[in-house]
Image (tube, rainbow, N blue to C red):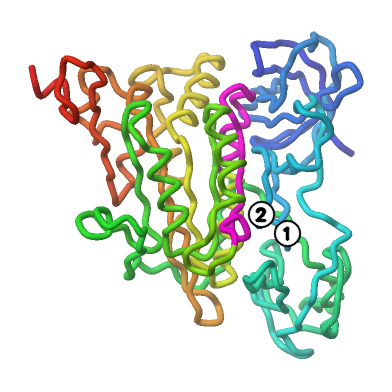
């Protein structure tokens, strides 16, 4: 029996709910508003009061509205068809939504359930498998997309049967596994995984040992980044951070590109939508979009969805890493994610840290960065997630400290690469390319 509740307090998209049963932190719920079901996430529980952040506009919400808790965390749907997709922070497929503007309470399936995929079995009946082991593969564009034992499976299983080579939809059973109790469990091409839980279905996570070529010679020569490493690009607005990220996405040595537009301005996101489908991949000669997934959450969308967008993007990268692929995650920008955390922290009246950011901001960002890395899979192959974030320094630093103390950024501590773009004045009275502070 699911837990229900009633709305008792509203502060923008922070809603207080009085519950009639048990709830857990990070649990999802639906709030009924005028016939719409608004998705929300529990971020704090105090007695019979639960504070939830709503991923939609709360206009029209009032005290007494009903709430239903779902008993699960925010999950991402994983399966063939994610590449070339454009999603919002909740993994709604933006290309299949009706109308020009996003409608409140409208949620779409991220995968096309009717497409047939040419399945080739890799496992044999009688094989012993564990979570993330490969059962078969399909071709997603030109990349081999491995169909794996779901990450949520615990313990060892025996393959009872595997579907023969042929065309199947993502919802058809492609294998049957038998657990230690003798129960048969069907497996399809689709699985779900909570976005805030790191995927740890691998044998080992060694330190990165290889260099990832970005295709930008000044970076590869003077400040290279490791394959499976982390880095970020700080700089003021308009200095070229986004352009540099796009160059790395096009030229970088990676199999899969995931771009997370986290609170970015809408015009820059539109540029991604219009430019990326036209770009030619220099490594393959095919369209770059064929191996790219875009997670879009613009600055005019609710701030709660910014946090969801970066976690959704990282989970998709971890999924492809488990296939033995090299993934590159570009987040633009993590400073706006920090802004969203500050806004929610202030609404909950938590003790503020420096510049009113949450006191645990460094821990939150460090834990997120730690999900990147190179891993040794169960079959001996390797996969990697390389993460490069973008920081708008004026949002995170005091103006006078901005050009001098990049280490003061909350995202600086877990990074291994710093690509700092200096502030260049547009004042016609100052020589081009000169930092105004260096001139006194």
Residue 81's label in the rendered image is: 1
Say which residue appears at 86% left-offset and 57% top-offset.
Answer: 113
Q: Is residue 277 above or below residue 398?
A: below
Is residue 131 something one can see in this rendering?
no
- How many numbered callouts? 2
Point out residue 108 in the picture as x, y percentages from the top left corner: 81, 41
Question: Relative to 319, does residue 413 appear above or below in the rendering?
Answer: above
Look at the image and give the residue range highlighted in magenta: 287-310
For label 2, the residue is: 84
The x, y position of residue 404, in whole percent, is 17, 29
Front label number (2 vs 1): 2
Please tell me whether mark 2 sits on a helix, a strand or a loop. loop
Real-space CA distance between mark 2 and mark 1, rounded to the nearest whole angstrom? 8 Å
Dividing the picture into quarters, in which one does residue 410 lie? top left
For image coordinates 85% across by 15% down, the residue present is 65
Choose between 296 and 135: the one closer to the eye.
Answer: 296
């Amino acid at each position: 029996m699911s837990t229900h509740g009633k709305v008792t307090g509203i502060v923008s998209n922070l809603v207080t709910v009085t519950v009639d049963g048990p709830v857990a932190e990070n649990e999802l719920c639906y709030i009924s508003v005028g016939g719409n079901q608004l998705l929300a996430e529990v971020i704090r529980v105090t007695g019979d009061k639960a504070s939830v952040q709503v991923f939609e506009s709360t206009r029209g919400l009032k005290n007494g509205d009903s709430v239903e808790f779902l008993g699960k965390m925010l999950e991402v749907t994983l399966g063939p068809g994610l590449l070339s997709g454009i999603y919002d922070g909740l993994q709604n497929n933006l290309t299949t939504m009706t109308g020009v503007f996003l409608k409140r309470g409208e949620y779409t399936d991220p995968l096309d359930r009717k497409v047939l995929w040419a399945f080739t079995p890799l496992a044999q009946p009688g094989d012993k498998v564990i979570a993330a082991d490969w059962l078969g593969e399909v071709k997603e564009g030109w990349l081999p997309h491995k169909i794996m034992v779901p990450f949520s499976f615990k313990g060892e299983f025996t393959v009872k049967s595997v579907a023969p080579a042929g065309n199947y939809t993502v919802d058809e059973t492609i294998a049957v596994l038998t657990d230690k109790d003798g129960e048969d469990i069907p497996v399809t091409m689709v699985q779900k995984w909570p976005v805030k839980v790191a995927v740890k279905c691998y044998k080992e996570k060694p330190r990165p040992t290889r260099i990832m070529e970005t295709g930008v010679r000044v970076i590869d020569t003077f400040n290279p980044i490791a394959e499976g490493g982390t880095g970020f690009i700080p700089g003021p607005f308009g200095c070229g951070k986004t352009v540099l990220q796009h160059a790395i996405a096009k030229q970088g040595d990676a199999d899969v590109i995931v771009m997370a537009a986290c609170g970015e301005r809408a015009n820059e996101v539109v540029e991604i939508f219009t430019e990326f489908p036209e770009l030619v991949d220099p490594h393959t000669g095919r369209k770059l979009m064929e191996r790219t997934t875009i997670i879009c959450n613009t600055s005019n969308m609710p701030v709660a969805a910014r946090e969801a967008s970066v976690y959704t993007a990282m989970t998709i990268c971890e999924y492809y890493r488990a296939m033995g692929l090299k993934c590159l995650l570009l987040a633009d920008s993590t400073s706006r994610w920090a802004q969203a955390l500050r806004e929610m922290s202030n609404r909950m009246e938590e003790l503020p840290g420096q510049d009113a950011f949450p006191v645990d901001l460094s821990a939150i960002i460090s834990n997120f960065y730690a999900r990147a890395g190179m891993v040794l899979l169960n079959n001996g192959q390797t996969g990697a997630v390389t993460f490069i974030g973008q920081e708008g320094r004026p949002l995170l630093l005091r103006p006078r400290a901005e050009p001098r103390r990049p280490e003061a950024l909350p995202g600086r501590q877990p990074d291994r690469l710093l690509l700092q773009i200096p502030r260049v004045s547009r004042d016609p009275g100052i020589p081009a390319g000169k930092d105004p502070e260096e001139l006194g």
